[in-house]
Amino acid sequence: MAYFTGRDVTVWITTEHEEDGIRLDGTAQTNQLITYPSSTGSTNDPNSIFSGLDSAGETEWILPNITGVDVSIGAQDEDISFMGLRNVGKIEVKKDTSISITKKKDNVYFSMLFQGQTKSTHSNGDGKHGGRYGLISKADKSAMLISDGTTDPKTTTDDQSTAKQCFGYRVYLELKPESSTGTGDGEVLVIPNCMFSEYGHTLSNESANEETFTLTSQVKPFIYNGEKGSGVYLGKAIDQTATSLM
Amino acid sequence: MYPKTLKEAEDKYAKYANADVRLAAWKEANPSASPAKKAEEKKKE
């Protein structure tokens, strides 16, 4: 486990779609999650929660008010013993990465994502679910929907003609930004295809309310060099996961 | 990267099954970048 305080790192969370994000629609008790092409909406839209991959690295989309980030990187092994051999084979089955983010609670976005409702026309189910699993394409590829989690990750694809993987969310943990644009000497831990697995809320009468949520992924994370062009991450950092890695 | 010109938008959305819908949404969000709007602005000048 590695623990970072909020001022040490910069965090972005995006969907696994190039362009579509999630926003909160409605007011007060009618709040519902909807999917929308984040880039065409204003980045100053106060109700936008996540953007698409194309906005990763943009200053406007930094996850604000973070107090702590806890990263746990591991792998699930399978033990294989052979007669006549003393050593046990530890065969890696898959990676197991989780990231817990604690932030000051200044809106209902993450509680809505974890346990809220989705507008029925923007859901691939009946809408009585949150946004834990990211986006999924309509069967006819006419639009993206918020997944209800009934489709397995590998079959969760987007609306491109050659469908790409788009299960869950992608987390960018920037440990060190590049020193100047294009130098690529930064360090960013990229955790693709995460899903929301836990959510907690701390109430206090003498300090700011905080929320902690955990995102989990079994897809191999990677380190990116932090290179940006026009203010956004490039190349592998924003490429959707290959089917063979899911 | 978010397309800034109509050409960029057309190139980017070509790979989507619903390219026409995405392009229409882009044009709506970027009226000043569409050829019709540009012609109108030129006329005003």
Image: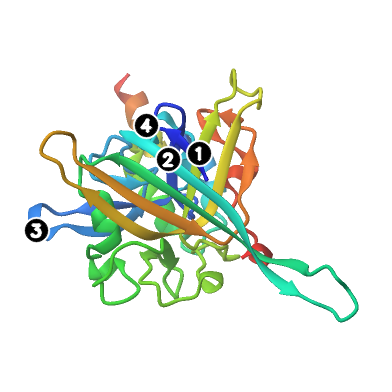
The relative height of residue A106 versus residue A169 in the rendered view (above or below) is above
Identify the residue shown where x is 48% and y is 55%.
Answer: A17
Badge 4 marks a residue whose secondary structure is helix
Of the residues tagged 3 and 1, which is closer to the observer?
Answer: 1
Q: CA distance from mark 3 to mark 1?
A: 33 Å
- The answer to whether residue B4 is left or right of residue A120 is right
Mark 1 residue type: Leu
Q: CA distance from mark 4 to mark 1?
A: 16 Å
Residue furthest to the right in view is: A84
Which mark is drawn over residue A60? 4
Residue at image mark 3? A29
Do the residues bearing badges 1 and 2 touch, measured as CB atoms within 8 Å?
A: yes
Residue at image mark 1? A173
Badge 2 marks a residue whose secondary structure is strand
Q: CA distance from mark 1 to mark 2?
A: 9 Å
Q: CA distance from mark 2 to mark 3?
A: 31 Å
Chain of the residue that carries numbered disc 2 in the rendered image: A
Percent x, y of residue A207: 17, 34
Res A97 visible: yes
The quadrant in which the C terminus of chain A is found is bottom right
Are there few (<14), some (14-19), or many (20+) residues within 10 Å of tag 4?
A: few
In which image quadrant can residue A119 be found? bottom left
Chain of the residue that carries numbered disc 1 in the rendered image: A
Q: Earlier in the sequence, mark 3 or mark 1?
A: 3
Are there few (<14), some (14-19), or many (20+) residues within 10 Å of tag 2?
A: many
The relative height of residue A39 versus residue A230 in the rendered view (above or below) is below
Which mark is drawn over residue A69? 2
Mark 4 residue type: Glu
